[in-house]
Amino acid sequence: MSSKTVGESITRVDARAKVTGEAKYPADLAMPEALHAKILFAGRPHARVLQIDITKAETAPGVVAIFTAPDVPVNEYGLQTPDQPVLCGPGSSKPGSDVVRFIGDQVALVVAENERAADQARRLIHVEYEELPALFDPFEALKPDAPQLHPHRAPSEFHPELNDMAGNRICHHQIRKGDMAAGWAAADVIVEGEYHTPAQEHAYLQPEAGLAYVDEEGRVTVVTAGQWTWEDQQEIAHALGLQPEQVRVIYPAIGGAFGGREDMSVQIVLALAAWKLQRPVKIAWSRQESILGHCKRHPMWLHCKLGATHEGKLVAAEARIVADGGAYCYTTNKVLGNATVTCTGPYEIPNVKVDADGVYTNNPPSGAFRGFGAPQAIFAAEMQMNKLAEALAMDPVELRVKNLLRETSLTAMGTPLPGGMSLVKVTEKCARAAGWQPQGTSGFRKPERPPGRGIGIAVALKNIGFSFSYQENCWAKIELRGQTEIERAIVYIGSAEVGQGAHTAINQMAAQALNLPPERVKLVASDTATSPGSSGSVSASRMTFMAGNAIEGAAAAALERWENKERPAVAEHTYLAPPTTPLDPETGYGVPNFAYGYVAQAVEAEVDPETGELNIVRVVCADDVGQAINPQNVVGQIEGAIVQAVGWATCENFIVEQGRVMTPNLSTYLIPTIADTPKQVESVIVEQPDPRGPWGARGMAEMPFVPLAPALVAAIHDATGIWFDELPLTPERVLKGLGNPATR
């Protein structure tokens, strides 16, 4: 019997439960005698908490307990460095935990018999604050005399690169490749630009929620939405002063993540209340609480300079990047590392200078979001390439093909990319699908468009998997049951399913590896009790790549035991990805990633000169996925990423003034509706196998997001002759750029 499932568009394993309403999301969960919790947020950007008076609140009807900073055994947490208090206030053993640093800092947790009682009691808490000088501009925060937002930061045992940062600088990355003076001397044409990209709200369908209780084995158990059960378990255990095995984390159905659930929200306070009270406790944030309480995409400012010969050969590039990291580190050091790697684009350039800083401010924290620093960096890089093509009077596709990285090319880090790269292939496939015509040996001719309509193109690469010397790994276990033949295979893995189809891909890969039909494979996932090994986060476009390799190893070992007559046959395997290195602190030299994804995108758009409104007529996306495990899922990821990128590029205007969010709900922060989506999206699936990927597959979920914005701006320029260097492209901004008198 042969069972081929990899490459087939099978029905998603969670489809029926989600369509029928059987699937339970965190806010749907309930237990007998469960209490309800509400969080008191700081509501101010920077202040010292002098006193918290809970006298009236704790005697209010229905109130069971109120927790403040002294109740947290180890009052700190953080994905990269523990710089954030669980609850802010006096009486904690951790220095600096009496200070709130953004409006969404948590000050107190009210637990009551019902949600209304908890909410009313929260209003009765009186907090006395001492206002502190606040910083809202990262450039001001970098000045030597700026107030220090984290004066008590302790050295990080796990992330020494964070130890030597002066002042409010979270991190610094730099590249020094070649000879810049010689590079600029060799340049016949130089383009220079200043770019600004905004924050972005994740706006996942399901706001933060969860249920915590003590299970039958005495473990404090948190059922919530996240992206990495193992990491959540570690952070909860640390803050509660428990051993990790005393904490259990379970993920039910999850309504989206996009990076926004990598960092803690309700997990620790839920665990704290359930552990202290020995009763179930649940919480559900409102949309406004969600927008105020979790991180956003990093706003970035990029100053770029690019030089080339008359023939279009790139000779030098410079970039200065400053990112607003907000009140806490979150993943700023890694996001800026990724921006450093991608800010000169997917091109071979002999002379490169880059300086990138992530900076503390009193704005909401910035964290992981689909693309993880690459959308901001690639926006600047591809804007520069399109402007350079105009300055050279050269077709933008031709200019790119002349300079794209090949197998033996050296990146800005001085090392080649891994094998199996396809930048030229995806660029040419995208261009041809969008209407570019080959001309001569290496030339291209842009398609003609009617007046008022333009076309633009952009190319990008992005890492797959964790970077900068982290030893990437993924654990899986497979159990084969039956007598004479395998009747059932059970796959244990920690992988979350946040809506992207990971569990379906895992099911297909396991079925393929075991030569079984998918219906005979059962997946047990997202529970630290059943998957004690780490499978890593569903982020960095890594889960298909990493889980597939882990499953291949576990399947091979389990089948060998089955052949040796073990019944049931059980085997586990931890896949270790090829090693990576940190960037050299002086030169930026290194091998930061073991795999990449490659994508090219063309956009056709129209501009209404009277209203400034954009009409995105068509998007062509050529995405190298190595091997499409489930082609329909791939198309879904491409279309979803494009719509999300359209929102970031055009209408999602996240406004923060003096640290306060002015767009705290979905009536003021506008995400795309069906009327705002492109009229046509053409997904071109490219399958250049990754030599290290399972069945050749490479990650792809983030890639289609990355090049949309610069391709759109290039299309607008093609239609109007105007460049737009700042996002989002709201009608007001477009009208102003077009010189409409009504906006002056």
Image (cartoon, rainbow, N blue to C red):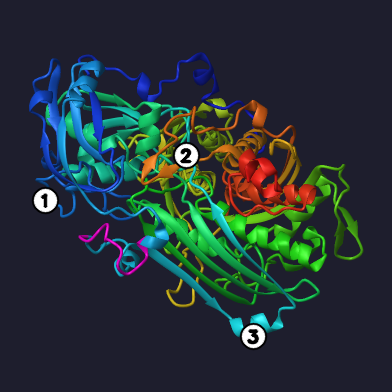
Q: Mark 2 points at which residue?
A: 201
Q: Crowding at label 3, few (<14), some or many (≥20) Cα neighbours within 10 Å? A: few
Report the mark closest to the observer, 1 or 3: 3
The image position of residue 161, as x and y in percent, is: 35, 67
- The quarter of the picture where residue 286 lies is top left
Which is nearer the N-term, disc 1 or disc 2? 1
Overall secondary structure of the magenta section = loop
Residue 143: in magenta span: yes
> Is residue 647 in the magenta section?
no
Residue farthest to the right, as pictured: 440
Amino acid type assigned to the residue bearing label 2 in the image: Glu
Q: Distance between the residues labelled 1 and 2?
A: 33 Å
Image coordinates of residue 599 in percent, x first then y, are 67, 51
Q: Which of 87 and 700 is in front in this view?
A: 87
Q: What is the three-letter code of the residue carrying label 3? A: Ala
The magenta segment: 141-152
Q: Quadrant of the N terminus?
A: top right
Q: Is residue 638 left or right of residue 433?
A: left
Q: In this view, does 597 lie above or below 171?
A: above
Q: Is residue 335 above or below residue 54?
A: below
Bin the neighbour count of mark 2 within 10 Å (Cα to Cα): few under 14, some 14-19, many 20 and up: many
Return the residue nearer the eye: 280 or 137. 137
Residue 206 rendering spot, x and y as whole percentages = 43, 27
Give left or right: position of 309 versus 581: right
Q: What element carries label 3?
A: helix
User: At 35% from the left edge and 40% from the top edge, which residue is drawn?
Assistant: 229
Q: Residue 182 carries which label?
A: 3
Q: What element carries label 1?
A: loop
- Residue 93 marker: 1
Q: Which mark is residue 407?
A: none
